[in-house]
Image: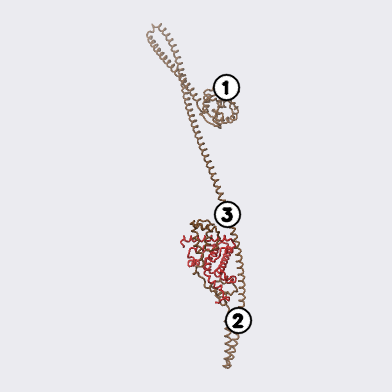
Amino acid sequence: MQTSADDAPRIEDELVGLLPKLKAHALYLTRSGDKADDLLQRTCLRALSRSHQWQPGTRLDRWVSTIMNSIWFNELRQRRQRQEQELPEPDMVADAGFERQMEAQLMVSELRRACARLSDEDFALVTKIHSYGYTYREVADELGVPIGTVLSRVSRAKAVIKRAADELRQGGGS
Amino acid sequence: MFADSGLSDELAEKIVAFVDREAGRDAPLTADDEAMVRRLIDEDPAVRALVDELRATNAGLDTLLDDVAAVEVPDRLVALIRGHGTSDVAVMTPASDERAGAEGGAAPGEGEVVTLGAPGQRRFSYGPLAAAASVAVLISSGALFYIYNDAHTERTRLQAVLASATEQAEIRGRELADARAELSRLAGIAEQASSQRQATADRLLANEDSLQQLQVERAALEGRYAALEDEHQRLRERLEQQRAEIADGEVARDQTTKDLADARQALTEAESQSQDQQQALTARVEDLTGELERREQRIASLSGELEAGKASATSAQTELAGLLDKQVELERRLAAAELDKQQLQAERQQVERTATTAEQQLASLQAELDEMNRRFRTVVVGLTAAEDGRQEALQQLVGMEADLAASKNWLGQIAQYHRVYAETARRHLVEVGADELDHIQEWLSGMLGREIVAPDLTRFGVTFAGARLLAINDEPVAQLVYLDADDRPLALCVIPSTGGAKSPTPSVDGELNLVDWRDDRYGYAVVGWSDPELLSTLTEAIQPVYDL
């Protein structure tokens, strides 16, 4: 292995450290083990190809998660355009790989299984604040909406999580 | 949102903000609202429960992506990243993931491994070709050395070998040139692929930019959506208000409907009462009619008795006359016998033997005479009794007529009068004759208090006979009497009446036909033995004349 000339930590090394978190992120988005790996790989390649755009000293996980969301939503949008919404959204149905990984790793609590029921947009919003350290103000500026709207959407998402978690508890977690 | 908690969305948002601010986040919440939530946490168990719930949710969300050490990350991806930026590592195994080859285009020219073909595709290498050429040179060098050491015997063979080797080398050289050309061509293809990937990457970048723009638009749309939701809420409230007004209107309408139903009920009851009264009157009329019939039968029976009495009296008179004739005959014969006796007494001397017989004959005849006288007296007694019975029947007839006059059914009484006067008193059909028409009209008009005219009905074959004044129930009745084509009497009667208007109604009273009608002050009746059709026709002609 080489070390870079300026002796700063290489983006590659930091990215490898983020892979478990990003894989979890991808699993929630894709609801499929295979698709999560695919999305993760495409995200990493794009991040590496644009590593010059990243400003060292800022949070890499935030930057890469933005790339992942962007790739995913882009793909969803194109897929919807192709299918004209004639078919149910395939990624809303978890495949076997996703179930296996969920049971093995992610979905040990009702809360986590409930989060899998969030829309992708709500998931992105909630993780911005709770997983990637965004402030409400930052989210509002990025989306170009009033901060009160961000609060409304966060509240709605948390209500969805609560309702889904309650259902899972009553359903015996089967 | 948190529908189970029973809290409004507005308050729930403030609680979410409050809990986030507890964790040091910058969720928007005014100081007043924060104080309010703080107070509600103490006062409202539902708020307290939601706060606890949100704290737990936040704790879980904070570690949502972090606490997953066992997540599988593909080794090749780690290797790919670690190998990034070095020139000597080619890790990608395209056979395992063809998409990786496509996605690899996102970062062309940065040392990433590019695979140009799938495994199994022909791959050209000039390494083995060069080795083959070297071997050929070595072999030819060894052959020359051998020639020098072992005389020239082998020279020709070795020269042949050399020529063969040279030929081989030339073949190998051509193959080498072909390989180089192929390599060069493939390099061109690779370069072309690189530039395509660059173009694809640029398009992806453009897509991302447009996505950002769309997100901004979407945020604006969400703002408008919120405004529209407010408007929607206001409209819903107005709708509720209008529904309430409609409900009030429906209550009022129901009340009106109920009043209407009551009124209908009252009307139905009134109609039912009216029917009852009508039925009672009908029953009464039937009773009176029955009574009248019974009385008629009685009159008929009495008339029969009267006729029988008359016949009996006539028979007795005839027999009496016969007996008187017989008595005269007997007296004449007695005188003859007396004459014979004188003759016989003169001749007594001669007929002494027959004298006794003559005396006996005389005694017998005397006894017969006595018997005749006795029977005559008996007949005279019977005649007297029959005369008494006739007188009694006449008195009963007068009584019946008085009863009739007292009856309430003026129509029936009219019929009865018609029967009595027109049939039994044919000779006194009218009180005043038709030749005194003007007098009749003046007379009856005075009695009835209205104009009474005798309509001209000759076009129906009905001629005016005269008039009579009756009294029924102390009311004067003008009776205009006509004779139909068959010379049967028929009468138009007019009587004051307060029974209310009534349309012409045909009826039958025994063998008599009637049509009667009423206006507000008078009752009218046409009665006679004529056909009902004729009476109805006459009524149509008469009614307009008497219309008030």
Q: Chain of mark 2?
A: B
Residue at x 54%, y 22% (from the top left corner): B428
Question: Label 2, on which residue?
Answer: B176
Q: Is the image coloured rainbow, by chain, by secondary structure, or in one colour?
A: by chain
Q: Chain of mark 3?
A: B
- In the rendered structure, which disc, 3 or 2, sits on the residue that comes first in sequence? 2
Question: Label 1, on which residue?
Answer: B432
Q: Position of residue B226 (x, y in %)?
A: 58, 57
Q: Chain of mark 1?
A: B
Q: Are marks 3 and 2 on the same chain?
A: yes
Q: Position of residue B304 (x, y in %)?
A: 47, 23
Quadrant where the C terminus of chain B is found in the figure: top right
CA neighbours of label 3 inside 10 A, class few (<14), some (14 to 19), many (20+):
few
Residue B129 seen by the camera: yes
**Between B134 and B110, the one nearer to me in the picture:** B110
Give yes or no for contact between labels 1 and 2 (Cβ–Cβ under 8 Å).
Answer: no
- In the displayed structure, B191 sits above or below B327; it is below
Q: Position of residue B127 (x, y in %)?
A: 57, 81
* Residues at marks 3 and 2, CA–CA distance in whole angstroms: 81 Å
Which amino acid type is shown beneath numbered disc 2?
Leu
Which chain is assigned red?
A: A
Q: Are marks 3 and 1 on the same chain?
A: yes
- In the displayed structure, B545 sits above or below B150; it is above
Question: Label 3, on which residue?
Answer: B232
Report the disc number at residue B183.
Answer: none
- In the displayed structure, B467 sits above or below B273; it is above
